[in-house]
Amino acid sequence: MVAGIALTTALLVTGVLVLGVGSVRIPAGDVLDVVLRRMWPGHADVSPVTDRIVWELRLPRVLAAAAVGAGLALCGAALQSLTGNDLADPYLLGVSSGAALGAVMTIVLGWTPPPDVPAGLATSVGAFAGALGALVLVLALAAGRSGDLPPARTILAGVAVAQLAGAGTSLVVMVFGDRQGAREVLAWTLGSFAGVRTTSAWVLVAGAVLATVLLTGSARTLDAFAFGETSARSLGVDVGRARWTFFVGCALVTAGTVAVVGPIGFVGLTVPHVVRLVVGPAHAFLLPLSALTGALLMVWSDTAARSLASGQEIPVGVVTALVGAPVLVVLLRRQARQV
């Protein structure tokens, strides 16, 4: 409870602080005035420029970053428990590679959306379609005659589909792409919140909240997998149904985030391990605290990505890798010393 309150407070304070960070510095008091004015018209008097920067440009990015970080951390924690694999992350089922193939085909092959549809939305639609295609293929390959999804076979199917989609992505870029298309593809595959707008941000927030509620409500089911499939069955868990539900649910959450902001690594892999070290493996605590920690990490990572280099934005995936990789190395060394 204390950790949850502390992380929630830290996330709210962080939101106010980072809304003022950027090429135009805005004091925290002005940020609060903008928010209060939007919630209660006439409450405060702020300049139109400040209002637009905070509310229309930065707030969607902060909301989207928090939602994506929370969603990835949640899915990583759930899949690590469900598969018994410490290296499991939200991209386990080839969703990221499928989304990349869909996005690349949209970017390189030049699918033109209707005039009233933003160009970025076309890429998101292509990425989401590619992610769903990869998910369907993985599930079709992994499911046995009984309809069960054994973790080992599911992981191997995910690896196979990811490699196939990766090869397809390279082929499309090499055969049909040009230098500009290749740069756009590279930028997309490293992740960015630059193109996020208000509608997309609130959709991501709604998805993250729904995922948090549903997964936390299923904490006991995930706890039952802690000692393996046999233990879960002995506790009355319908293992086959649980696996289908969690695999598909986590894949859909991941597909939604990848479609909007691209694949962002290390958050879903590293955050659950860090939180598990602090609060233990009980999912009633692990899941919501992982969501809050992932949200914090992603908000600060996106803030660093858009403010560290003057006049240039660093892909957020680069920042999360620079933070996540050393943390993972420390965790691995710590475990090695305990064996």
Image (cartoon, grey):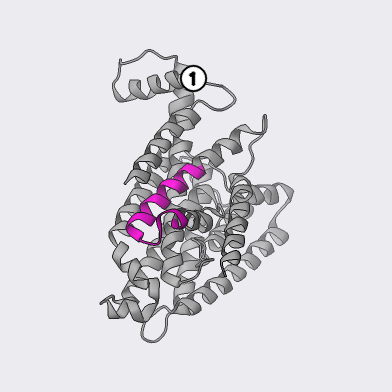
In the drawing, does residue 206 fall left or right of residue 311? left
Based on the picture, tell me whether residue 12 belongs to the magenta stretch. Answer: no
Give the percent coordinates (x, y) of residue 127: 52, 56
The answer to whether residue 25 shows anywhere in this view is yes
Q: Which residue is at 30% across, 15% downward? A: 42
Q: Mark 1 points at which residue?
A: 27
Give the percent coordinates (x, y) of residue 116: 46, 40
Q: What stretch is highlighted in magenta?
A: 276-298
Asked if 26 appears above or below 309 in the picture, the reply is above
Q: Name the amino acid type tagged 1.
A: Pro
In the drawing, does residue 122 fall left or right of residue 325? left
Q: In which quarter of the image is residue 45?
A: top left
Quadrant the C terminus occupies: bottom right
The answer to whether residue 68 shows anywhere in this view is no
Count of numbered circles in the view? 1
Based on the picture, tell me whether residue 284 belongs to the magenta stretch. Answer: yes
Q: Out of 109 and 26, give the one closest to the viewer.
A: 26
Q: Which residue is at 37% across, 45% downward? A: 3
Name the dominant secondary structure of the magenta segment.
helix
- Identify the residue at the far left of this view: 236
Element class at badge 1: loop
